[in-house]
Image (cartoon, helix red, strand yellow):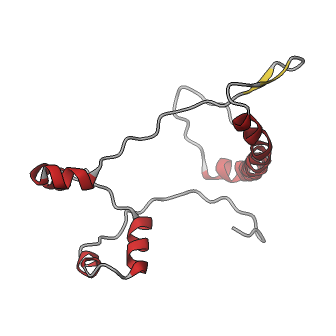
């Protein structure tokens, strides 16, 4: 396990190569653990949903399972805004406040009901690139 320090440590190339097996092992353990946890959730969550307000408690280990709620990210009602205040909608668009929904676009395109999509496609820009770390072992399937 890597110990965090307050100071930024300069790791040498060889040091990083030496810790790759541990990093790979941690990655595999995390994936296995996540999958296992998801399997448990599939069993526990439906029971809790069927018994509102209840929780599961193991007195020996003092482990509790309960449903919690969290607020979702607010969304802007573009359709209502465009009808009620088109100038404000246009301003919001110019300020970059709208996001593109690929799933909605694909669904509309598949329906082939809107000629406007052909025009809209001319304004699509490539998505930004992100870089992710991949730690793999020869023979792994990604």
> In the displayed structure, would residue 97 be above or below residue 10?
below
Depth check: give the residue in front, 140 or 3.
140
> In the displayed structure, would residue 99 be above or below residue 59?
below
Q: Residue 2's image quarter?
A: top right
Q: Residue furthest left?
A: 87
Q: Is residue 118 left or right of residue 19?
A: left
What percent of the width, then of the height, locates residue 93? 19, 55
- Report the residue at 49% width, 59% height from top: 131
Q: How many numbered badges does the structure rendering display?
A: 0
- Report the residue at 61% width, 52% height from top: 13
Q: Is residue 73 left or right of residue 57?
A: left
What percent of the width, then of the height, locates residue 7? 52, 28
- Report the residue at 38% width, 70% height from top: 105
Residue 1 seen by the camera:
no
The N terminus lies in quadrant: top right
Q: Residue 45's image quarter?
A: top right
Depth check: give the residue in front, 1 or 85.
85
The C terminus lies in quadrant: bottom right
Residue 123 seen by the camera:
yes
> In the displayed structure, would residue 48 be above or below residue 58?
below
- Report the residue at 78% width, 39% height from top: 44
Q: Residue furthest right?
A: 60
What percent of the width, then of the height, locates residue 120? 25, 75
Q: Residue 43's image quarter?
A: top right
């Amino acid at each position: 396990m890597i110990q965090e320090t307050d100071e930024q440590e300069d790791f040498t190339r060889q040091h990083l190569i030496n810790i790759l097996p541990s990093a790979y092992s941690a990655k595999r353990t995390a994936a296995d653990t996540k999958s296992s946890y998801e399997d448990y959730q599939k069993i526990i969550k439906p029971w809790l949903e069927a018994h509102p307000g209840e929780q599961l408690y193991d007195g020996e280990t003092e482990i509790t399972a309960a449903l919690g709620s969290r607020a979702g990210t607010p969304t802007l009602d573009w359709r209502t805004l465009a009808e009620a205040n088109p100038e404000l909608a246009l301003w919001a668009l110019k300020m970059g406040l709208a996001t593109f929904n690929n799933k909605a676009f694909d669904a509309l395109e598949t329906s082939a009901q809107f000629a406007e999509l052909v025009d809209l496609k001319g304004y699509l820009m490539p998505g930004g690139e992100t870089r992710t770390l991949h730690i793999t072992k020869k023979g792994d399937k990604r």
